[in-house]
Image (spheres, helix red, strand yellow):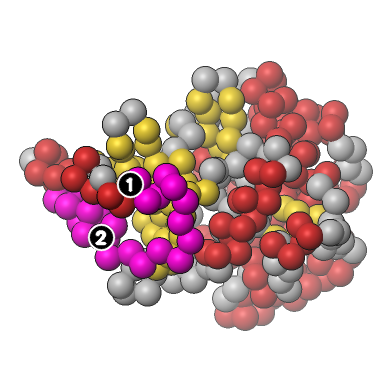
Amino acid sequence: MKQFEDKAAGQALSDIWTSIEWHESTSTLNLLITSMAELTFSPLSPGLEAEVAKITHGENQYVLKVWNKRSKPDVQRQYRLLETLQRQKIRVSEPIGYGKTEDGHAVLLTRHHGTPVTKVSPSIFKKITSVLADVHRLPADGLMMKEVPKYDFINYFFSGIEAYPAMKENLIYLVHTADMKMDRIIHGDFNLGNILEEDGQYTVIDWTNGQLGDPRFDLSWACLLLRIYVSDSKSLTFLYKYQEEIHVDAGELEIFEAIACLRWLLLDRIAGVPKYPDTMKNVRKIVRNNRFLNENVEL
């Protein structure tokens, strides 16, 4: 039965591929277009925002992302951002082309860079945090900034919070207290699922939320997800390795952890987030131990 399901999924992906109107292309994309009969398509695990597929052409593999859910990203700007980051020697997805399907859904084609990180260690965290720190160090001036959007923080990361007035009030207070500095490139969703490993090299993918922002939020979101889904000790190791690159005051990070936690709780309410047997227990522990959330969050 699974064989037939995979075949049907592959055909559906093939149909999407042939319907794409490409707005930017490379020699690699042109080769793939003219080699349609030689391509194989297989679905990858979807995210909250898009469907994802792997395209194989001989020994080469690519990733096609189709935003066919509620998210409507500026895929052209994401493509340009990837180009810019590559020129700065940051290990990100190599952009191949972008466009839209006949249904108007944005698509982005990148090179495949391995498999998501599932095992971690201090040495692995050292490599991963080095990439994140390199991103945060990039100067916020010059031609590069034309490719990096700047959004209102609350409107972008907390869309839908109006339905939860108490949470919004808490958030506004925290953002004001944090004295956010929106002047550096951030990834916006840095987590192990968005880091691929291939032959000992680590590549950061999914730059949908890439923008000018505060690196402390980027760091705190990554640490929060490690606390929720892995362990406190692994989260601390990640933080320590980042601190070897860029120092951040611990008191500031507690505020940003509270902001990140509110975002996770909002996503849980409006879109659903992955949950495992210990997930909510871990979240309750984080809320209980963060002095900015103890009396303000309902789980």
Residue at 14 percent across and 45 percent down: it is: 7
Marks 2/1: CA distance?
11 Å
Residue at 66 percent across and 79 percent down: it is: 165
Residue at 82 percent across and 63 percent down: it is: 182
Where in the figure is residue 86, as x and y percent of width and height?
65, 43
Query: For this rendering, which residue is in front, 170 or 296?
Result: 170
Q: Could you tell me if the residues under marks 2 and 1 are in contact, i.e. CB atoms within 8 Å? A: no
Secondary structure beneath label 1:
helix
Where in the figure is residue 42, as x and y percent of width and height?
27, 43
Taking 17 as reference, is 179 left or right? right
Looking at numbered disc 1 in the image, what kind of residue is underneath it?
A: Leu
- Mark linked to residue 18: 2
Taking 105 as reference, is 119 left or right? right
Secondary structure beneath label 2:
helix
Where in the figure is residue 224, as x and y percent of width and height?
67, 45
From what the image shows, is residue 219 above or below residue 232? below
Query: For this rendering, which residue is in front, 132 or 2?
Result: 132
Which residues are drawn in magenta?
Answer: 8-31
Q: Which residue is mark 1?
A: 32
Dot 2 surroundings within 10 Å: few (below 14), some, or many (20 or more)?
Answer: few
Taking 94 as reference, is 91 left or right? right
